[in-house]
Amino acid sequence: MDRAAVRAFMDRFMQMTSGAAVLGVLSVADRTGLFQKLAAQGPLTLEEVVARTGLQERYLREALACLAAAEILRYDADASTYELPDEHAACLADESSPYFLGGWTQVIRALLAAVPGVARAFREGGGVPYADFGPDMVEGIDRTNAPGLRILLTRRWLPAMPGVVERLEQGIRVADVGCGCGSAALTMAKAYPSSTVTGYDLDPTSIERARESAKREGLANLQFEQVDAEALPTEPGFDLITSLDVIHDLVNPSKVLRRIHAALRAGGTYLMVEPNAADSLEENLGREGALLYAMSTLHCLTVSLAHGGEGLGTAWGPKKAEQLCLEAGFQSFRRLEIENPFNAFYEIKL
């Protein structure tokens, strides 16, 4: 046995353990609004943090120590002060920032809660239905994706497809398939008031949240429907259809792609956004790939298999994506040149 290799693995394992444990403290800080109270405040003593937040001193002392040790807060030993750097605040405190990561604290919590069900599925088959992941997953996904969507969808993603923005400005019919809590549909409806936008999702909690957001915005050109993607309306059809991180989760992705093909009008465009994975395991080895396969095992794969689905998995890659789209009847499949560490973007046409 190579003892140096054992020690190296132990060190790496403990780094993962430390990260997971710190993520739990980050989750508490997120739930209590701690980061919002620390943002743009400069160095603060423990007593000043207590006064500013109204949180319990003993818990704060321990949590601040943890966050300082993890280099999330900047600690000045001479002054005994804690500071949240602006760069970290953009990721943890500002939900309007495209760098915001706070939703991950809820997503990871929901993933870990699903472990007993996934272990049972390992032994018996089946999976864990999406509804069993609870509100943390619904809200966490929305908080993770929405900040980038609100900024990048209309500024970078849609303009990457020739003619699409011009048609949206003139007025077309748009469908967002698997709309979740509605951030993408709402963003398009606000940006292009001459177009009509409908968001479709099977999850009742997501649709309820989406409708509440639409009501607050008062947009006459936006609506949400609780509809399975397999039953997407095909008449009178749509000029633009989007699915953002959806297809790989589905029970029957091939059937849904055929349905999208049937619902897309001549000359229309389908924008499919999927995880930024390569086609093979050897290309996906590393930290990013590990996260994709973990998400797949604990969520995306099991959600599909829970209903006897195909179990496409998160890291299905561009070759498989193109294959399924061409099999569904599409004639044109093009990967867009959009730099993004998390997602791949495909322009698909009849």
Image (cartoon, grey):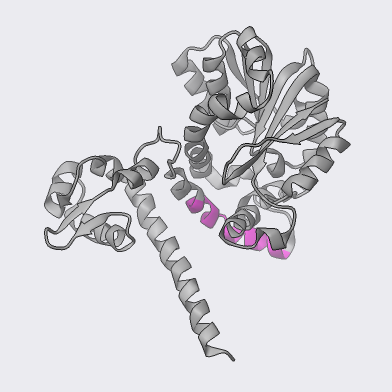
Q: Is residue 74 left or right of residue 269?
A: left
Residue placed most toward the observer, 305 or 341: 341
Q: Is residue 155 left or right of residue 254?
A: left
Which quadrant of the rendered structure holds the N terminus? bottom right
Which quadrant of the rendered structure holds the C terminus? top right
Residue placed most toward the observer, 231 or 108: 108
Q: Is residue 187 visible?
A: yes
Q: Is residue 182 visible?
A: no
Q: What residue span does the magenta drawing correspond to?
A: 108-123
**The image quarter in which residue 234 lies:** top right
Does 268 sit above or below residue 66? above
Does 36 sit above or below residue 16? above
Tally of numbered tags: 0
Question: What residue appears at the point 44 percent right and 45 percent down from the top-left corner?
Answer: 101
Residue 160 horizontal/vertical position (percent): 64, 28
Residue 107 horizontal/vertical position (percent): 50, 48
Residue furthest toward the bottom?
1
Question: What residue appears at the point 64 percent right and 62 percent down from the top-left corner?
Answer: 285
Residue 111 horizontal/vertical position (percent): 54, 53
Residue 298 shown in magenta: no
Q: Is residue 208 left or right of residue 88?
A: right
Residue 331 horizontal/vertical position (percent): 86, 30
Question: What residue appears at the point 71 percent right and 61 percent down from the top-left corner?
Answer: 281
Residue placed most toward the observer, 208 or 275: 275
Question: What residue appears at the point 62 percent right and 57 percent down from the top-left corner?
Answer: 289
Q: Main secondary structure of the magenta part?
A: helix
